[in-house]
Amino acid sequence: MNTAQTPAVRKAASAQQATLHALVAVAAGLAADGLADMVGRMTAVLLDMTTAGNDAQAAARRIRSGNLLQDNAYAFVHLASTGIEAALRREAALLAPAGKAASPAPLTLSLVPLEEMDSQLAFAAISRPFDIQHSESLAGLGVRLGLLLGRELVRASHNPFRPEVFLRALQEAWCEFEPDAAAHGLIVPLLRPGIVFDFKPILEAVGDKLKPARARDERFAKTDGSAAARAARARRDAAVSQQLRQLFGAAEAAASAELDIPLIPNLPQGSGGWRPSAASGFAAAVPADGRRSVAAQTEAQMAGPAAAAASFPAPLIDVLEKLSGGVPGAAFQGAAAAPHELFYLPRLKQSLPRGSLSRGDETTLDLLSRIFETVLLDESIPQETRELIAFLQVPVLKAALKDRSFFFEDAHPARRMLDLLSNAGWERPAGPDDPVYRAMRRGVDKLRRETQPEAFATAVADLEASIAEREQLDEAAIAGPIAQATRQEKQAAAARSAKKAVSLRLAGEAVLALVGTFLEQRWTPVLALAYTIEDEKPGAVDNATRAMDDLIWSVKPKATQEQRQALIKRLPALLTTLNKWLDAVKWQDAERLQFFAALAECHAAIVRAPIELSPQRQLELAVEAAQQDALLRIAREQAEAAEQEAPPDAAGAALAGLERGMRVEFSGPRGVRKLRLAWVSPLRTLFIFSGANRQEAFSLPAERLADAFRAGSIRVLAAEGVVGRVLGEAVGQGAMNDPAREPASAARGG
């Protein structure tokens, strides 16, 4: 038989072993923390002569052992802690799969010594009270260990964290600690609940380690993929910046070595490979009045510098500095520019002889030509805004030539200014006194008049302040609807979560009809209230959910005396919790009294039922019931986790990526509308959109928005700035080379 294991199997086995080792460390550490108090209790019992009996030798032995333990507590704690950890590791090694397949050992038969059989029976009796007391935690841990190892569950006798393992380790530590062999038996009566450390925190901590990792606040289903979308854009931008850095570095090296390296594909390649667009606003025709356009005047001014640069590449920044006033918008003081005066950069390159620019300057000019073409052809940007942007062609070109980080850093002032103008200016100004439009005009005018590097930073700060003020006004305008929508959303989400929590428990367990009806009709409102107030009172959901689970447990049959005692002990706190929550939801009628009377009769019947089973059979029934409950509970947890972790479809992913401030395009019976996402509810179940100048505002629930994405009636316009988008296209990150890409007018809608 082939026993070879694949690398994937060996890797999974290694991960399982690592998890088991981590669980052993947790359990051993918590047990060690409880040893000091346990030693104190053991010493008190050994030195208590009221229970020593009439045997003088036995009493003297107890006194000697008690004093030995009292005087050397640290030594026993050390022996016990190391012994417990070693025992847990041995048991875990038996449970863990081997990293390398081994040949099966031949089957051999051997007799078990009578002493070992007696020891096994003795420890089975010693550990039985602990097994019954912690049957639920042990059963849950067995199911989780089974999931870890790819099994249905790990049986109680194979659970490495069963109480018997700890108790045996304590007995062995005592035998090593106590030199008098006749006193070795003194430890056995001390291995009982109340003296030995509590196993509950140990079992709970180990079980929690095996639970699937989930978000702390999972009471509402909430999907937000905006952070992932921003991270993806950041990675894409970093890749683009790296390629551009390499491009400019290679261009500078080529200039010094006189190498011929290719430019980015599809960029404007001078007068022979690219011509100005013939779209409206970009024609270079001579006006009817016979005056030459600004571009034509600039070409004439460029004749001298161009001729001088024909024989060797000249720095473009020097050429631009010689253009004293012949740039577009020389007379800009609020007057509208003629259409033929708006296009400049591509014609500047055409006016220069081929090869007169260095490769780095030529690449800079080509990239900025494409950026401005994209913006100035974008019909979604109002004409007034495009005219302002056109006046920035030369200032931005100068800034990029002086500092190439324009292409690498989003926060570069010149790049930031261009992005702000193209994004903030998508709304048509309400009038000449529109605050944002006035800030845009001030900034452009300042940049045309001042050449200092600080001018862009000042203009950006002014424009950002105006945009922030507009956003505050927008928020104030919809503050009322937002507050109401937030309350309604929270209440609806709480009701859904409460109903789901109850239905999951009723669907997976055979719940007594009395309790099932109560949970559906009366406890669902309690859970909804708990979900609603969880933010103000953390722990409310856990408290109400635990009370529901304890109520379900309380009406199940109790086969052992220990289980019945546990029920009697837990009932007062359970009834108090139930009544407090029912008072909170104001259920005060006679039906409430009838329910608690029927519940009391049910509990009394459970406690009074005769027990006609052996202790071993009682334990078996308790363990079996606990295992079934654990299987149902953990299956419910897995279903919830799978629902939360299920990957969304394309529409769900698009919905998750929406962020406040994004622009979207709606297509419908009223035509195409471009709107801004003004607000996203905290749980992302409601989205408010607004039009230009707050002339239109409406809300859409997440379900309808997802349907719109599926139907294709909504499209998210580009989220990143125009500079980054164009640069990404230029270096192959976009769809520039894809023949099936959208037309330019559509693709540039954002």
Image: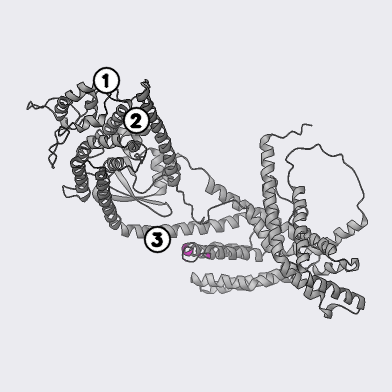
Q: Which residue is mark 3?
A: 487
Q: Where is residue 133 drawn, in percent x and y?
A: 73, 65
Q: Secondary structure at mark 1?
A: loop
Give the class, few, some or many, for how many residues have Cα within 10 Å of label 2's Cα (few <14, many ≥20).
Answer: few
Q: Amino acid at mark 3?
A: Arg
User: Looking at the rendered structure, which numbered label has been put on residue 742?
Assistant: 2
User: Looking at the rendered structure, which numbered label has been put on residue 354?
Assistant: 1
Position of 717 with respect to 189 (left or right) is left
Q: CA distance from mark 3 to mark 1?
A: 66 Å
Q: Amino acid at mark 2?
A: Glu
Residue range in magenta is: 532-539
Position of 526 with respect to 241 (left or right) is right
Q: Are discs 2 and 1 less than 8 Å apart at CB?
A: no
Q: Earlier in the sequence, mark 3 or mark 1?
A: 1
Q: CA distance from mark 3 to mark 2?
A: 41 Å
Q: Secondary structure at mark 3?
A: helix
* Residue 55 in sight: no
